[in-house]
Amino acid sequence: MVVIVDTISNPLRPRHPEKVNRPDSASPPKPDWIRVRAPNTRGYADTRNIVRANGLHTVCEEAGCPNIGECWDKKHATFMIMGDTCTRACAFCNVKTGMPNALDAAEPRNVGEAVAKLGLAHVVITSVDRDDLTDGGAEHFAQTIRAIRAACPSTTIEILTPDFLRKEGALEIVVAARPDVFNHNLETVPSCYLTVRPGARYFHSIRLLQRVKELDPTIFTKSGIMVGLGEERHEVQQVMDDLRSADVDFLTIGQYLQPTRKHHAVMRYVPPDEFSSYEKVAYTKGFLMVSASPLTRSSHHAGEDFARLKAARAATAR
């Protein structure tokens, strides 16, 4: 269980101040198919040291990803830019909330250097929500993409962005930097938004993904949801249809895991065979790529998936 108080950077500051006074929400015991090994390999340690040396944050650590041991052992890390503090307070997320610090002007260069040191063929860059910035951090994303291109011209770049809600022109700035994959997660079905993702708007996120394709049809688009938050099967299928209407290429579906008892409870652990069923249905709806399993996460196996995504597009173009 992840603690809810940050005792490292400031022992008096709650990690999630908006959740401290909430009653505990108990989740059912984890089934066997959810359990993973603790990270303790040499590759994991090497990746951690490079991240620390460059003063970077990763969503792998901040969000408590269960796949961190596997990914970091392979020197695959998802960098989280614009600090470690988010301006929103989603009920599912373990990233710290509050008022963030000013942007670090050296961060794009530091990310580029870390990507070079890790020798990444494919990198995933995400961020906290920065509603305090006039462009939501769009220019910082663009600078980071350009810095990686300068340091590692052959590295393909996948970004996982916020929704840039009420940030006119922000999306255009990011798309103009030409990432190879543009990912923005819906996270859950519309009926759960008020309790799970209250600061976001479902159809704004759908429109964001659709607009990426309008601006640059060559960019692959991607989105993901969690299950186990109280959604119904027909709602998941409607999300698939909405994403296909926006011409989204790649869908990920994973099990929601409760970071602390102050976060949204797990309503149900979805068994592996249901994930397999979702994957089959999604492919019939026209997605080029689908990843659906209990431990699927947006950036898990991202490099291998990108190669398969390119192959799938090439096959449909014949």
Image: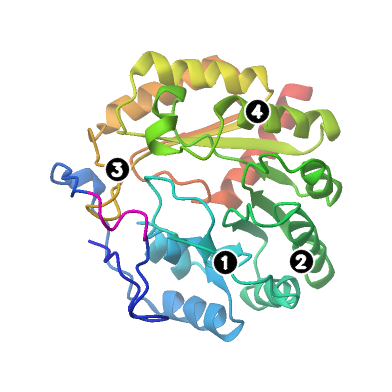
Residue type at the position of mark 2? Ile
Q: Earlier in the sequence, mark 1 or mark 2?
A: 1
Name the front one of labels 1 and 2. 1
Give the main secondary structure of the magenta stretch. Answer: loop
Q: Residue extending furthest left?
A: 29
Label 4 vs label 1: CA separation? 31 Å
Tell me which residue sits at (50%, 50%) in the image. Answer: 88
Of tags 1 and 3, which is closer to the observer?
1
Across and down, in percent, residue 136 comes to 70, 52
Per the image, the residue denoted by label 4 is 248
As measured in the structure, the alpha-carbon distance from the residue carrying label 2 to the one carrying label 4 is 25 Å
- In the rendered view, would you say 89 is above or below 98? above
The alpha-carbon separation of the residues under discs 1 and 3 comes to 23 Å
Q: Please indicate whether residue 158 sits to the left or right of residue 168 in the image.
A: left
Task: Work out whether mark 4 precedes mark 3 in sequence or the reverse, and give the earlier one.
Answer: 4
Residues drawn in magenta: 17-22
Q: Which residue is mark 1?
A: 100
Q: As displayed, is residue 43 above or below residue 235?
A: below
Q: Check disc 4: other Cα within 10 Å, few if <14, some if 14-19, many if 20+.
A: many
**At label 3, which amino acid type do we have?**
His
Q: CA distance from mark 4 to mark 3?
A: 28 Å
Q: Earlier in the sequence, mark 3 or mark 2?
A: 2
| 4 vs 3, front mark | 3
Q: Which residue is mark 3?
A: 264
| Residue 79 locus on image (x, y percent) | 58, 64
* Label 2 neighbour load within 10 Å: few <14, some 14-19, many 20+: many
Of the pair 309 and 80, the residue shown nearer to us: 80
Circle 3 sits in a helix, a strand or a loop, which is it?
Answer: loop
Q: The residue tagged with tag 2: helix, strand or loop?
A: helix
